[in-house]
Image: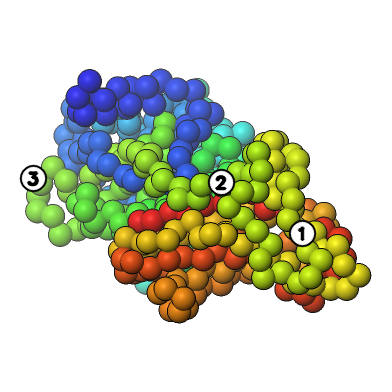
Amino acid sequence: MGRQAALVAVLITALLLPAHAAFATLPDTATLELNRTIATTPFNGSSVSMGDHEGSAFIPSDSSLWLADDAKKRIYEVDPATGDLKRTIVRSAFNEALQLGGGPAAGSERTNDFESMAYDRTNDVLYVFSGPCCNSSILATAFRLIRQSGQFQVESYQPLRAGADYTGAAWSPTDGKIYVGKGQQMRSFDYASATEGAPFSVAGVNGITGMDFSPDGTDLFVTVGSERLIRIEWSTRKVVSGWSFDLTPFGIRDARAVAGIGDQFFVSDGVDSRPSGDPLKYAVFVLDAIAMEPPPNLVGNPGFEVDTSGWSASGSGSGVTLALASPGRNGSAGAARLTNGSNARKKCVLDDTPNWVTNTAAATYTAGIWVRADAPGATIRLKLIEMDGATVVRSRTVSRTLDASWGQLTAALSSVPSGRSLDVQVFVPSEFAPPGTCFYADDASITES
């Protein structure tokens, strides 16, 4: 099967998957490839054209991608497989909405700046957020759409605090909350009370323009103003390594929104500079997440399944021993265990002896290892050392607090020249290692890139 045929097969398979299967097979590391684009000027089989992209949201039960048009003050329901326009909800429907609880109609001052959308799968509710652009008379507002006779209709609105401007929004399956974002900050939002949670940020994420959770809530995907797509592990609020992608090589110049559909990303481009007639003007770019072949592991005995060969307790204090323990991480046959058998605190070191990498090629090298302890609290360090013969050239040390569950340490040295050797040391300093088990280690790795 050729590459083009394979991509078509991926798309068809993805769109036929049930909603909960989307993003189920995303790899730990990936690259993005452009599958196709969806034209919106005009939409396929229609004379209607998008005026300016802002938010988006996917409704799995309808197989519909909703797009917000900031310039024409309306939203569109689109078939993500064909690009066909299914339906348009115009500005007047939002203008006429009453405030939740029976207040006044929204009016045009609340519908001037459609910014983002979010879909609550549990309650089958679609939210549209409008911002305060571009003068003091424009009011930030949240609108709620519910099904009436099988179709979404604008049901009510809630005024937002002065200055609120949610450029990204998404519903979390984990806690059933709507999360909104702008700039570096994200926060929860409750529609019934029109209140916000405390703001928080994720290191490495700034200029939020779009947000969408994976169906299981494990990950949050965001687009940012630097035209990047970023994957965030939601439980730790950290960017997933290897999941920050530059979107500009695909022709995306102004990423405004992202929606995940069947292991693909639908990114809305809102750049205004493309001329009329350009098929990419306000297009939706459909991107495949392609698994990368992981780099080979240069560690000869990474899993300690049979023995601890290639490793020693060299550099440890007297009385510290290395032995095999069972089970290892994820129920494997073995792991390494460092034990302080003395009556005093001792430094506990797990060292690769001899070094697994004795002759480098010019590259970046990354060492990793999973560790745990019987009880939490001690500090453990991973040190990757570059050596020229017997001379230490430089090193990189990372630390973490040991826990009773497995956690990973990684350290990297960039631009290592050829002809060097690398030494890997995993150790607990003496002040953290009283008599007894120091730590367990498993699944060691050294990779080059």
Q: Which residue is mark 3?
A: 277
For the residue pair 395 and 208, the one nearer the viewer reads as 395
Sooner in the amino-acid sequence: mark 1 or mark 2: 2
Query: Which quadrant: the C terminus?
Result: bottom left
Q: Quadrant of residue 34?
A: top left
Q: Which residue is mark 1?
A: 321
Q: Which residue is mark 2?
A: 301
Q: CA distance from mark 2 to mark 3?
A: 60 Å
Residue 442 lies left or right of residue 73; in this view the side is right
Q: Quadrant of residue 109?
A: bottom left
Q: CA distance from mark 1 to mark 3?
A: 73 Å
Residue at x 31% of width, y 47% of height: 268
For the residue pair 8 and 336, the one nearer the viewer reads as 336
Residue at x 78% of width, y 64% of height: 320
User: Up-down: is 262 above or below 362?
Assistant: above
Sooner in the amino-acid sequence: mark 2 or mark 3: 3
Residue 428 lies left or right of residue 374; in this view the side is left
Instruction: Give percent across and percent down for residue 380.
Output: 69, 66
Task: Find numbered disc 1 in the image and state the secondary structure of the residue it sits on.
Answer: strand
